[in-house]
Amino acid sequence: MNSIVSPTSVTCPVCNSVCEDLPLYHYTAKQAAAHFCPITRDADRYQRLEASIKKLWQGDECSILRCNECGFAFGYPFVGGDEEFYGILHEQKGYPVWRWDYDVAINQALNPTGGGKILDIGAGVGMFLSSLGKEWERYAVEGSESTRKVLEASGIKVFRDLSTSADKEAGTFQVITMFQVLEHIAEFHEVIAQCRKLLSVGGKLVISVPDGEAMIRQDRLTGCPDMPPNHINKFTADSLSRVLKDAGFETTPAIFEPSSWFNFKGALHLRVIADSTKPHSIAAQVYRVPNKLLRTPLIAGLGVLAMLKMLPYFGQLSKGGAFTIVGIAK
C-alpha cells in the first residue's frame, strides 16, 4: 500500500460516500505489532505478529479513514485479522467474566421475549449462554476449534458456518447476540443480513461494539490506538443504526456503557502499553525485567505514574468506551 491514500479512491463501507478527508491516523506493521505485543515483552511473538499483519495488509502500512456523511471510521486496507493473526494475538488471553452489555441484552431482549432459540455469535467459551435458563435453546458461532469443543461440552449447539446455518434455520430464532464482534469483521453487511434471515419477525438482534468516537478519544489521550487489523470498524451509534435499518431492522436508541472508575483504570493500562512500545522508555525497561516477582510491583509503579499524568482527563477517560443497539426484525 502507498503511504498516501487518495481520498477520492476510497468509499465508506457503510454508506458508500467518498471519504474526502485525509486519514485520521497512519500506522506501520511494526507499530501495529508493537501495540499488540511490545518487542521488549516478547520479541518472537512481536516478529510473528508483524509478519502476519504485513500479509493481511499486503504491505507495510494502514490508514484510518472517516466518512463525513455517516461518521463511520475504518482501517484501510479494509481487512480484518485471520486465523493466523488471532492465533498469535490470543496467546496472551484476558477476557472478562461478566460484561455490562450482557445485562443490556437480558433486560432489553431476553426478559421481554421470555424464551426460545438464541444464537450468540463469537460466543467464546459460552459465559453468557451458560448463564441462561432452560427456557432458552442455546446456539453459538465460534471460530476456534478448541473453543467449539468447550461449548459443545457445555450442551451448547455450535454452528460452524453462519451462512449455511442461515439457510437451514431461517426464521427460527428469537434472539441473536454479538458482543464486541462486529468491529473485527469487514463483511459486516453480510453477517447482519444472515442474522435477519435467521430471526423470526419481531426477533431481536443485540449488538455491542466499541464507540468509534471513544476510540479516537482514547488514541488522543492515552497514545494507545484502537489498532487494526484487530478492530477495523469504528462505528458510531448513527452509522450502526443505518446498517441495521438497511438490513430490515427497526432500531432502539443506543445504550452507552456507564462511566466508571474501571474505565479510567483501563485507560491507565493503555497508557502504560503505549509507553512500553518505545524501546528506550522506562516502561520498556520494566517489561525487560525477567523476574516476575520484581517486575509486577514495578508495573504497578508505572500505573501510578500514568495516573498522575492522566488525572486531568479523568472526566473524559472514565466515560464508557462502547454502546449497544437492539435491532428488531421487521
Image (cartoon, helix red, strand yellow):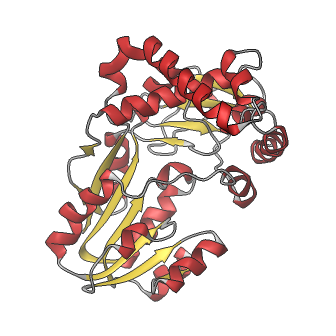
Q: Is residue 277 visible?
A: no
Q: Is residue 143 left or right of residue 99?
A: right
Q: Is residue 40 left or right of residue 249?
A: right
Please tell me which residue lies in front, 202 or 99. Answer: 99
Q: Give the residue at x 27% y 61%.
A: 105
| Image height of 124 relative to 179, above or below | below
Residue 164: x and y in percent read: 55, 81
Q: Give the residue at x 30% y 76%.
A: 132
Residue 4: x and y in percent read: 72, 22
Tell me the quarter of the picture where residue 238 sits. top left
Q: Is residue 270 visible?
A: yes
Q: Give the residue at x 51% y 15%.
A: 305
Residue 24: x and y in percent read: 55, 22
Residue 70: x and y in percent read: 39, 36
| Image height of 278 relative to 33, above or below | above
Q: Is residue 249 left or right of residue 159?
A: left
